[in-house]
Image (spheres, rainbow, N blue to C red):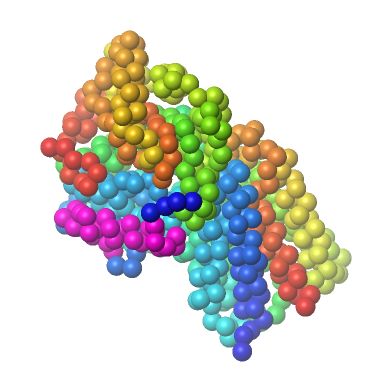
Amino acid sequence: MKKLINDVDNVVNEMLDGMVAAYPKYVKRLEGLEVLVRAGGSDGKVALVSGGGSGHEPAHGGFVGKGMLDAAVAGAVFTSPTPDQVYEAIKAANGGKGVLLVIKNYTGDVMNFEMAADMAADEGIEVDKVVVADDVAVENSTWTTGRRGIAGTIFVHKLAGACAEAGGSLADVKAVAEKVIANVRSMGMAVDACTVPAAGKPSFDLAEDEIEIGIGIHGEPGVNREKISSVNEISDKLLGKILAEGIYNAGDEVAVMVNGMGGTPLMELFVANKHIAEVLADKGIKVYKTLVGNYMTSLDMEGFSITLLKLDADLKPLLDAPADTPAFTQF
Amino acid sequence: MSSRIHECIVRIGETIKDNKDFLTDLDREIGDADHGVNMARGFTAVEDKLPADETDIGAMLKKTGMTLLSTVGGASGPLYGTAYMEAGKIAAGKTEITAADFGAMLEAAIAGIQKRGKAVKGEKTMLDALIPAHDAFMEKANAGADLVTALDAACAAANEGVEFTKTIRATKGRASYLGERSIGHQDPGATSATLTLETIRDFLKE
């Protein structure tokens, strides 16, 4: 394993300090905790708290700031943060108007965030939660723990965050988050696996000419393995599965995210987006806004995911609203 | 002077740490390659925090559970944390335990895991080792066997449970995303649960 690290056990700690050193105007760290909160506090508005395992940077700490998150909790690499850490984040972010937890649908994340919510509720803090489950690679059935939460989570941060910033109540903010969750779908693939620093070796092995379709964001293997093909063909597969959901139809307007997994050059993401834009245009689906970049990564994994969010007159202004965070800024 | 329950918990931690890579490798096959790493981190913290002279078994287990809860993370943190804390409630105030006590503690731990994880037997989780272990334990204990004899039966059943997890597909946890591809692999959580029971048995035999 070759990594730019000092100490395997100290990577998350050093990363958080490095983020604070880079963005002191945006974020500060709660002392002794793996939690980043807004440098200016969150008084007088509903607070959004998210987080999860580390290794998905810039998610989630990079989205703490005006118009998006109020606090982000960083667990160990690919490991949900513990209830005590989430609880401290809730307490710190609470500006008196209630707190919404944005949880990605993983067994550990849901358990730890729910325990933290119980602890905060016991203290009289108004807490509610939404669970993002946008990954169409996983069948949503009694046979699985439910669909995973992946890159679509960023749209939940953005739109629910805009609602909170505009003075929405906890119920309003939750309703926006739920609406985004109902209208957002994603699917990803890997050209090559990632290496968790503490594990020291790749999370799965792929032959030189193999790719993994339907991967999650934790180095877990995908739903099937196949020979590599052109990025257009791969994009067709991912997009085909997303469109098969029946949510996105001719005449609809969508936001598109082409998200890099951490080890794939932007050049390749733009190549993918050229084709995605053409396919959507062919189908009469209008692209209102496109985001191309590394938003929800998986360490050094090579690959990408596609996310579509169906928009309407309520969601568009929230997508367009200003945001000012380390990893996403628009005016 | 270190109490017996302190020694026992330290011993469980040593087993987990000795098997860190093994458990992580099992998790790499069907999960996210962190089970051994996370559990080892948790038990390192447990060793640092446990009062060596505490003789109250319930208090020691509660402290162990709370420490695991705040250091392991993932799904294993809440599940193992809850298991130790629930077992600790049954053992509160006790400085030694009988077979009947242990049976009740194991039952409480399993109930806690089921409540937190919303899982049942047959979903390729730690319950597939623990529930048969508890059944086998109670059968022996109800027939008048002592703690160690009953634990021998429990460990044998837990190992069979681990073997059983190889034959089924996961429907809980990250392994469930693999669908049929999870068949053929043993469950890391069932494995660490079995290692825990074996360590307790071996410790009591000494």
In the rendered image, the vertical position of residue A60 relative to residue B184, given as above or below = below
Q: Residue furthest left?
A: A331
Instruction: Specify the quadrant of the image occupied by residue A207.
Output: top right
Compared with residue A228, is residue A322 higher up or lower down, i.e. above or below? below
Q: Nearer the viewer, residue A213 or B176?
A: A213
Q: Is residue B140 visible?
A: yes
Q: Position of residue B37 (x, y in %)?
A: 54, 58
Q: Which quadrant would the C terminus of chain A be assigned to in this image? A: top left
Extent of the magenta region:
A5-30
- Residue A191 located left or right of residue A166: right
| Relative to B33, B123 lies left or right | right
For the point 64% across and 78% down, which residue is it? Answer: B7
Q: Name which residue lies at 24% across and 44% down.
A: A327
Residue A92 magenta-drawn? no
Q: In percent of the image, x 20 and y 43: which residue is there?
A: A67
Compare residues A148 and A268 and report the one nearer the observer: A268
Residue A127 vs residue A161: left or right?
Answer: right
Foreground of the two, A273 or B71: A273
Residue for point 27% across, 55% down: A19
Residue A87 visible in image = no
Residue A78: x %, y % from top left: 45, 50
The answer to which image quadrant residue A239 occupies is top left
